[in-house]
Amino acid sequence: MIPHMSNRPDKSKRKELLRRAKRSVQEKALDSLPLPAETMRRLFDMLDEELPAQGCDHSLRLVRAWAAEYDLPTETLVDWCRENHGYCDCEVLANSEEAFLAAMGER
Ligand SMILES: [Zn+2]
């Protein structure tokens, strides 16, 4: 007799529930993105280039300037950055990009 055989269906069911829960968290994160994914990538690419050159002044100066330049909804973007622990330009690159990649299932 194989021990714990009777536990198997429960275990796989639990795994399935976990998988679904994880996916729904990811889907919600994806739905909450303020801009299309490819536009978000351009934001992080810009920060990658501009932060070493200009430094972070502990504000969202670069994020705001970039959004204004491309006529994007600045406040919606800034709200999303803050919700994802990006309170200044360098934190957006360090924290909000992680949240973006997680939403994309790429982390
Ligand atoms: Zn900073």
Image: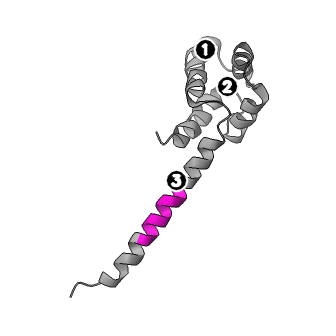
Q: Is residue 47 left or right of residue 60?
A: left
- Disc 1 residue type (three-letter): Glu
| Residues tagged 1 and 2 counted as in contact (Cβ below 8 A) | yes
Using a 10 Å C-alpha cutoff, classify the residue at mark 2 as few (fewer than 14 neighbours), some (14 to 19) or many (20 or more): many
The answer to whether residue 95 is seen in the rendering is yes
Q: Is residue 25 left or right of residue 83?
A: left
The answer as to whether callout 2 falls within 8 Å of ligand 1 is yes
Within the magenta stretch, is there residue 17?
A: yes
Which numbered dot is residue 23?
3
Q: Position of residue 55 (x, y in %)?
A: 65, 17
Tell me the CA gap for discs 1 and 3: 34 Å
Q: Quarter containing ligand 1?
A: top right
- Circle 1 — which element? helix
From the viewer's perspective, is residue 30 above or below residue 22?
Answer: above
Q: Is residue 37 left or right of residue 106?
A: right
Residue at 71% from the left image edge and 20% from the top image edge:
67
Q: Position of residue 80 (x, y in %)?
A: 70, 36
- For the view shown, which residue lies furthest in the bottom direction? 1
Q: Single out the mark in the foreground, 2 or 3.
A: 3
Tell me the CA gap for discs 1 and 2: 10 Å
Which numbered dot is residue 89?
2
Q: Which residues lie in the magenta part?
A: 13-22
Residue at label 1? Answer: 50
From the viewer's perspective, is residue 49 above or below residue 78?
Answer: above
- Image-quadrant location for residue 88: top right
